[in-house]
Amino acid sequence: MGFRIFTKSADIETDERSEEFSVIEDGDLQYTAAGGVNSAKATYQEASGAPIEIKSPLGYSVGAISVIGLNLNQMIGTGVFSTPATVLSGAGSVGLALFYWVIGFFMAGSMLGVYLEFLSYFPSRSGSEVVYLEQSYPRPKYFFPTVFAMQTVLFSFASSNAVVLANYLFKLANVDSTAWMQKGVAVAAYTVAVLLLAFDTKWSLRLTNAIGFVKTITLILIGITGLVVLGGHTSVRDPTVNFRDAFSGTSEATVYGATNALVKVMFSYAGYSNACNVANEVKNPTKTLKWSAPASLLLVAVLYILANIAYFSAASKEEILNSSTVAAGLFFEKVFGSSGASRALNVLICLSALGNLLAVLIGQSRMLRECGRQGVLPFTTFWTSTRPFGTPLGPYFLKWALTVIMILAPPAGDAFNFVVDLAIYPSNAFNLLLAVGLLLTRRRRQRLNIPSSGYRAWTATVCFAILSSLYMLVAPWYPPSTGADGGDVSFWYGTYCVVGLAIVGSCGVYYHIWIKVLPQLGRYEFRQTQIQVEQNATANKLVKVPLDRLEEWDREHDALGRVRRRARTGEIVYETKGDAFES
């Protein structure tokens, strides 16, 4: 398939919101280039995507330290303190359990390479997956933006970490609690987290960085203490018992157990790409993230492995598997005694959970805002506006409302675990699509002679990311050895897989009805127009154009959906305001 390049003539003027651009036509695809002030590289993207915001309305408060802080805070939640026992149970042996944390690092690292190459292509677009899926699969038009936007909105809750934070707050206060007491405190804690972010971006990032620093120091101290225990300098008897025959029990591991263990490991690494969500708030994002994002992942991986070695040095395999306390709690009791150790650990876990809530809120609020800017969601101003504090209040409010509902509605136990698993599973499908989409995007850019972005992940790394994502998508269907009802819940183990895919499928059905069926019945087609929401905030908006006026619309609008109007001199200029065709 050939392509054509159209460049605006020199005698055409544009207003300040409509930078001069060229159009590269590739079949029915149209690629335009625009540059944000945060990057020297232009962003070449298919014209149906959300417009480039030349100057970020959220400011430029994210530097290398904040990049590391955002990634660290989302990765280091409560998983490293509580999941080692589950990982050990699934792996069957200490050696394989430790090896799983290494495998998880390589799986996360391969996907991070995919994210970083995409970021180099679109340095002035925040929202990561929202943008990368939109540009990898531009046809059918608006399909992936619609499906991913709906899925993102439906699953934009953080109830699990809020409930964990509430549980540890009660432990810290040494107070017995009921389920509804925990729910109430979880709602209050999440409300506080939202309020901490709602009024100022710069200070919220500083708070997140400070909490990330405390968490990092905590894991460093646990790792160093573990090495001291292994050296025989504490009261722990036989600290090397778990390492003399480290792979004993591996043969007893089941496919389901191994998969469940790997899922828990990957859950603990989730957040390695969080900083990509704020790319347009980073000056020179490609240069900054290509070292700081891998550095944060490597640091976390080393700390995770050292923490697990520390846990296994202080307690036997049987004690870790049979203990009623988390692995970190057992370690503190064995090394420091039970007097003040448990209280100190609870303080650290509470801080860790709070930092995770803040980091997830920052990253996902940008994803939601970018979904709103694509034009496929109603109430564009609600998603896109940053008034009055320069923060995305609309996305913050939605996350708060859905999280409160998901804290209060599901009962504890099976229903709660099911909702958590349901939110995780579709992300494996999108990871697979992203990794495949990167290869497609590479090929397309090479064919169109688009300039190099300055970063390229190894092809072997991308292929490993594809295989890893495919495994995480397929393996959960393998049944547990104890039967179909023997998984994490008391009902069929694969229910969350079916429901997760069904929800994504229903989003696809909605798209077909909205974009195909209803326009055919109503004798209209959708066209996009670019609107100015605020001074620096722009967005697309889909409008209905009657079939008998399509030619007129296409003649009077450019590739980005901006109105061409003729000035008195006869030159063509562009507008980004509302449109008479809007209905």
Image (spheres, rainbow, N blue to C red):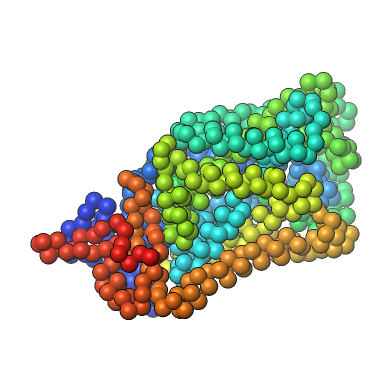
Residue located farthest toward the left when viewing the structure as drawn: 569
Taking the image as shown, residue 117 lies to the left or right of residue 40, namely: right
Does 83 sit above or below residue 444?
above
Residue at 88% x, 55% y: name it: 252
Residue at 45% x, 79% y: name it: 520
- Residue nearest the observer in this picture, 60 or 469: 60
Q: Quadrant of residue 196?
A: top right
Task: Report the quarter where the C terminus lies.
Answer: bottom left
- Note whether residue 531 is visible: yes
Taking the image as shown, residue 363 lies to the left or right of residue 315, namely: left
Taking the image as shown, residue 499 lies to the left or right of residue 118, namely: right
- Residue nearest the observer in this picture, 102 or 289: 289
Q: Position of residue 222 (x, y in %)?
A: 71, 30
Q: Position of residue 33 (x, y in %)?
A: 32, 59
Does 284 sit above or below residue 538?
above
Residue located farthest toward the top when viewing the structure as drawn: 339
Q: Position of residue 22 (x, y in %)?
A: 27, 63
Residue at 53% x, 58% y: name it: 149
Residue at 56% x, 37% y: name it: 194
